[in-house]
Amino acid sequence: QVLLVESGGGLVQAGGSLRLSCAASGRTLSNYAMGWFRQVPGKEREFVGAITGSGTVTRYGSSVQGRFTFSRDNAKNTVYLQMNSLEPEDTAVYYCAQSESFNIRTNTWEYAYWGQGTQVTVSS
């Protein structure tokens, strides 16, 4: 059984930084692409970033490009989302997800497993 557990969310002032972690268990992490999504009440879940199973290729949503960095440590079965220059518009629940594919996936339906989410709040 695949289990994803996010951590690292919290309250930060605009312009600050946070690093989210997602610890995975249940199968070999390096075989699967991972993604980060975020959601605010009343809106659809938004693609934030994705990384291939090997970690050599990443892709980001346009709203976070240049500010967020997705990385992974397959030896620790953990992926990370470094978020810099945070803006109040980044406030959301952030979800880690695991695909059934090795390659980049950007849509929610392309991910089979999800974490419980971690709240990120950016104050102005």
Image (cartoon, helix red, strand yellow):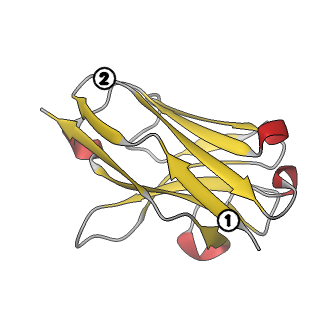
Quarter that holds the C terminus = top left
* Alpha carbon distance from label 1 to label 2: 29 Å
The numbered dot on residue 16 is 2
Name the residue located 66 percent from the left edge and 49 percent from the top edge: 23
Image-based side of 104 in relation to 86, left or right: right
Name the residue located 28 percent from the left edge and 70 percent from the top edge: 43
The residue nearer to you, when weighing 54 against 1, is 1
Image-based side of 17 in relation to 36, left or right: left
Residue type at mark 1 is: Leu
Image-based side of 74 in relation to 83, left or right: right
Element assignment for label 2: loop
The percent coordinates of residue 24 (x first, y second) are 71, 55
Q: Residues within 10 Å of mark 2 (few under 14, many from 20)?
A: some
Residue type at mark 2 is: Gly
Residue identified by numbered label 1:
3
- Quarter of the view holding residue 109: bottom right
The percent coordinates of residue 114 (x first, y second) are 58, 68
The numbered dot on residue 79 is none
